[in-house]
Image (cartoon, rainbow, N blue to C red):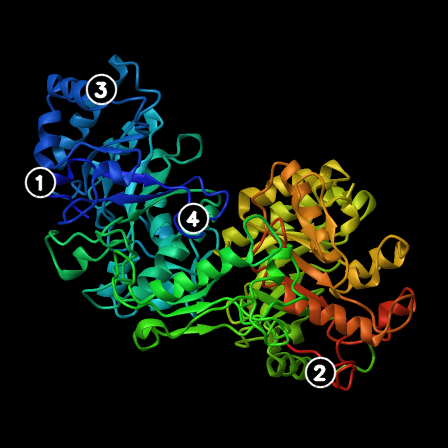
Amino acid sequence: MSMQGVAPVLAAALAIAAFASFPSGVRSIGVCYGVNGDGLPSRSDVGIDLALDVGDRNDVSRLADASSAASWVQDNVKAYYPDVKIKYIVVGNELTGTGDAATILPAMQNVQAALASAGLADSIKVTTAIKMDTLGPDSSPPSDGVFINPSVMEPIVRFLAGNGAPLLANVYPYFAYRDNQNIDLSYALFQPSSTTVSDPNGGGLSYTNLFDAMVDAVRAAVDKVSGGGSNAVDVVVSESGWPSDGGKGATVENARAYNQNLIKHVAQGTPKKPGQMEVYVFAMFNENRKDGDATEKKFGLFNPDKTPAGAAGVSIVVSESGWPSAGGDSATIDIARTYVQNLIEHAKKGTPKRPGAIETYVFAMFNENQKPGEATEQNFGAFYPNKTAVYPINFQRQGVASMLTIALIIGAFASAPTTVQSIGVCYGVLGNNLPSRSEVVQLYKSKGINGMRIYYPDKEALNALRNSGIALILDVGDQLSNLAASSSNAAAWVRDNVRPYYPAVNIKYIAVGNEVEGGSTNSILPAIRNVNSALASSGLGVIKASTAVKFDVISNSYPPSAGVFRDDYMKDIARYLATTGAPLLANVYPYFAYRGNPRDISLNYATFRPGTTVRDPNNGLTYTNLFDAMMDAVYAALEKAGAGNVRVVVSESGWPSAGGFGASVDNARAYNQGLIDHVGRGTPKRPGPLEAYIFAMFNENQKNGDPTERNFGLFYPNKSPVYPIRF
């Protein structure tokens, strides 16, 4: 978007570390800071580093004079660098298609010379920012991208190539969607869509979102000038966003979907150039003084008062607040009574920003002696189980009840949690009496099971999963060595087993190997790399490639903080996953740990039953179940490998109902129901919802190994439950 007037002389790019849900491995996510608005925060209140734009077209024209450029660098760069980490000087924003285009290159050359004289040319790159209409109208498919004004753009691209600078491009799928009724909204928003664009001239690359197609059209135009290869000029997306109001498709929901999906997507790159890329979201704030149509004022992520855009009218309900009466520092009856009574009195007043009654729920009705975690967790109740008060409390003082809604959350701790990110169930087929694939998918849906794992690309199962919404872990089966052997093998596998089904089948992860051992472990990382590259080249980078490991990849698992990977190959895998944003898949079985060491591990501790507490002496964390301890040992190993930001998805966990020591219906039900109820809370080291897949859906009578292997199922082959289970 063009910048007009005096205020926007500085185009600030906010390289923020934690905007929403930023994926690991993204080289840079920034946010453009425009100041065409009333009531915006002060610059110091924003608290950011700046990327510098030279200003409007008049400023660009002045910089075509060498002495003016030298003065500009002296006054606006040397005075601040390196305290301000200026990365790019942007000489002109969206001017290449205007009458001022002829001044851009001379201005860039003069600024470059001034930076060189100041000793800053190696650190700060000079560039310009273009609109998409700098490309010709026939830039679809993307490989046909070409500059419409080559006399302007070709010298600029050669200048950039000679100085190792990128071309900045303002890429707005919103405007393309708004102006072309043939573009599907989901395709523009990075959402699953029936639209897939194949580029027959670009090596068969496929595009599942409009952003990638637009960026790769710019890359194609640039490569036609620079020749690509070692001379390739990178493309930085200097603006991209979606308005939350003011025009066709401009809603809070669409703006959030686009911007959040963009943030998640840029770590993968585009089909033409997979890998991390640099993107700046437009814009930080809604700006009420911007010219143009109404959408121009509504691209902000935030309102001027720093509330999220679209949230000004959203009320906040305090869903839990309380104070424990025992079990920890400052957890006393007197302090608990003081806090809760004052909360009741105070909630009628509201806050300084939002005066007025606040709907508030005090946690909790009763002390709950079966809650896991530290001792305070069992002591938040206003009442003992016998209904006597822990401390006196008054809910009807001075008309409070008529002015605010205040209620007590009843601690129905045994009920299924509402915060579970995902509970899936592994679907094994090693049985001669199992239901059809379509019946199985219907059973998943009828039970509310929202995730599935299959152990090879079962075409019948994949077809049955179409449009079911069930998230899928898809294993590569016995193809590990083949996928490691060459990138072309991986491309063929993705072509045959992923592209025909996604997005109708919600494939979430590719498990490249399951519990691989021995010399085959050397094939894991090359295979993951090849599959990941094939996914990115097909425009399917949203699907994450990982591997599923046994718990014995961990050594020194007690206490959990001592967890470390047994072999170096796991450290390399972990570090690679950190760059792609993929999780590590881990098969976590407390059953086998208990069976192997019943003297030191109690059955209750292994099955989420109360009665055992284990403290980690290295960090003071307390464990009431073996599952958490095993998970936190994996997290500790990831941290020691330099991959502490890698998530762990539990790709298998379960308990057998027959066939061996400790294998009973009661124990299996206790463990699996306990797991379902527990995963919404996470672990002591990593609180919060986690993703887990129970092994398995059915008892499988043809599985090899000891009898327990045939008895991990939640259901018999006739679809009747082995024991009651609640999802």
Distance from disc 3 to disc 1, alpha carbons, whole Å, reads: 32 Å
Q: Residues within 10 Å of mark 4 (few under 14, many from 20)?
A: many
The residue labelled by disc 4 is: 266
Residue 379 falls left or right of residue 203: right
The residue labelled by disc 2 is: 436
Q: Is residue 162 above or below residue 427?
A: above
- The amino acid type of the residue labelled 2 equals Ser
Q: Residue 596: which quarter of the image?
A: bottom right
Residue 238 falls left or right of residue 620: left
At horizontal 29% and vertical 58% (from top left) the residue drawn is 351
- Nearest the viewer among 199 and 516 is 516
Q: Along the polypeptide, which appears first: circle 3 or circle 2?
A: 3
- Residue at disc 1, secondary structure: loop
Q: Which of marks 3 and 1 is in front?
A: 3
Checking the image for residue 513, the label placed there is none
Distance from disc 3 to disc 4, alpha carbons, whole Å, reads: 33 Å
Q: In this view, does 698 lie above or below 563?
A: below
- Residue at disc 3, secondary structure: loop
- Residue at disc 2, secondary structure: loop
At horizontal 64% and vertical 69% (from top left) the residue drawn is 677
Residue 402 falls left or right of residue 543: left
Q: Residue 101: which quarter of the image?
A: top left
The residue labelled by disc 3 is: 79
Distance from disc 4 to disc 1, alpha carbons, whole Å, reads: 33 Å
- The amino acid type of the residue labelled 3 equals Ala
The residue labelled by disc 1 is: 99
Q: Along the polypeptide, which appears first: circle 3 or circle 1?
A: 3
Q: Nearer the viewer, mark 3 or mark 4?
A: 3
Asked if disc 1 and disc 2 are in contact, CB closer than 8 Å, the reply is no
Distance from disc 4 to disc 2, alpha carbons, whole Å, reads: 39 Å
Image coordinates for residue 287, horizontal then vertical, percent: 17, 52
